[in-house]
Image: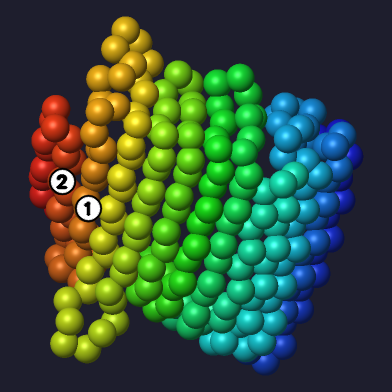
Amino acid sequence: LDQVGQVNLMTTTDDGKLALHLDAHEDNEGFTAKLLKLPQLTPLSVVADMKGRTTAEALTLNVGAGPVTLKGEGTLDLVTKRFVSLQAGLDAPQMTLRPDIGWGGIHLDAQLQGDMMAPDGHATLEVDRLAAAGAGAGTLRVDFSGQTGHKGQEDLLHLLLTAQGIRLPGPAPLLLASAPLRLDASLHPGETGKPLDFDLSHPLLHLNGHVM
């Protein structure tokens, strides 16, 4: 796209083994800064490595986008599409990407294993002072827990989202600000149709449902 950047990709395969190395870099004059107009996320770098047998691929990932960092490591079974183990973390300091988009801080921590589409483990996302297009929240927290692959126990994926200090665009920006808004959702991946139960609650509203 006629912007400054560099991508190196190397792969090798041999007798049930796969090796991959990705090294991509972009400076302050690249695609992210010039075309996406997000210079705050530069310089950008992505370094990823996979090596080993396709049933036990060792993975390391390091991403940097300005002050934002994403790191991950683990072991993958590409044949059965499972995480043998995966640890990942993201950190972002206070940033303003555009006049109406920004946050006070972001932190993500994840520890997963099992089926990639229905993992076992837990993950937590925390966002402070989120603002986007006139809306926002003082704090946003998302907790994920997966209970899958345990003999004698039902497979269950659970997500709890809590938003406090919500601000809305329009004439009543503080309508929901007095109390937390909570979304509690549970997915049953082992049942026919993978049913989803959800409950959205706030002192001013309550919505629940069952989706097949």
Whether pointer 1 and pointer 2 mark residues with C-beta atoms closer than 8 Å, the reply is: yes
The residue positioned farthest toward the top in the image shown = 171
- Which amino acid, by three-letter code, is at mark 2? Asp
Residue at image location 87% in from the left, 34% down from the top: 29
The residue positioned farthest toward the bottom in the image shown = 15
- Which amino acid, by three-letter code, is at mark 1? Ala
Percent position of residue 129, x then y:
48, 34
Does 62 appear above or below 45? below
> How far is disc 1 from disc 2 in space, using C-alphas?
6 Å
Quarter of the figure that contains the N terminus: top right
> In the image, is 1 to the left or to the right of 77?
right
**Residue placed under numbered mark 2 in the picture:** 199
> In the image, is 162 to the left or to the right of 62?
left
**Residue placed under numbered mark 1 in the picture:** 185
Percent position of residue 191, x then y:
15, 68
Quadrant assignment, res 206? top left
Color style of the picture:
rainbow
Q: Is residue 18 visible?
A: no
Residue at image location 61% in from the left, 74% down from the top: 73
Quadrant assignment, res 15? bottom right
Residue at image location 63% in from the left, 30% down from the top: 96
Give whichever of 4, 1 is nearer the camera.
4
